[in-house]
Every structure is written in C-alpha cells, then in structure tokens.
Image (spheres, grey):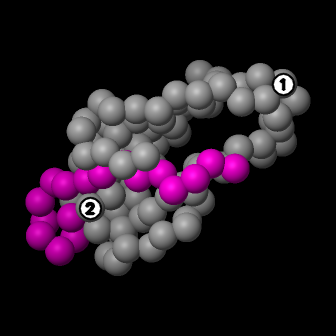
Amino acid sequence: MLTDELGDYMRFTFKGTAISIIGTIGVRQGLIEFLLDGGDERLDRGWPKLVCDEVIFEATDLPYGEHQLFASLTEKGINPNTGEKDGVFSVQWIM
C-alpha cells in the first residue's frame, strides 16, 4: 500500500495472537494512526534517510481470537531536507 492522501486508510480483520506491519521510515514519511481493537497509537516515521523493511507497528501477546486493525495517514510529517510538510503511508507487508 502506498498513498500520500490524508485520510486514506487500510482496515482488516485477522485471527491470531500477534501482528507486525512492515514498511518504510525516512524522508517523506507521514504520521500514521494505528487502532488495534479500538486502541490508539500514533507513529511519526520521519527519519533523515529512507530505510525499508522496518517494523512500523507490532502487537504481540494478544488473546487468541479475531482482531481488527485500522491504520490511516493522519498528518504529513516534516521533511528534514526541505523543512516542508510532506508524507506518505507505505506498507511493504503484514505478518
């Protein structure tokens, strides 16, 4: 998944005890809000250089069962190279 539109989101249901979202951090990475079963976590993925294959969200030791994850690009981050608001939401894979 790759988007630069504020409010774009992904939502899915999974069954299990853990989940990891693998994506990128770096220049042009935005603020992402993750909601797992209604909880709330914000992640600023801004970093001076692009790094792929990073765990950008992880939940372990969940009670076995069905869970729902929602993630949305909620704010553009500050591009450290330009000082301007900029950002994308990119997910490489889900484990």
Q: Nearer the viewer, residue 95 or 47?
A: 95
Q: In the rendered image, which quarter is residue 74 located in?
A: top left
Q: Is residue 52 found left or right of 94 in the rendered image?
A: left
Q: Position of residue 46 (x, y in %)?
A: 35, 63
Q: Position of residue 8 (x, y in %)?
A: 33, 33
Q: Could one spot residue 39 in this view of the protein?
A: no
Q: Which mark identifies residue 28?
A: 2
Query: Which residue is label 1 attached to?
Result: 65
Q: Position of residue 51 (x, y in %)?
A: 45, 73
Near mark 2 (Cα within 10 A), the count class, few <14, some 14-19 or many ≥20, is many
- For residue 79, above or below residue 62: below
Q: In the rendered image, which quarter is residue 39 located in?
A: top right
Residue 63 in the magenta stretch? The answer is: no
Q: Which mark identifies residue 84?
A: none
- Give the residue displayed 27% in from the left and 42% down from the top: 75
Q: Nearer the viewer, residue 52 or 56?
A: 52
Q: In the rendered image, which quarter is residue 3 located in?
A: top left
Amino acid, disc 1: Gly
Magenta part of the chain: 79-95
- Badge count: 2
Residue 82 in the magenta stretch? The answer is: yes
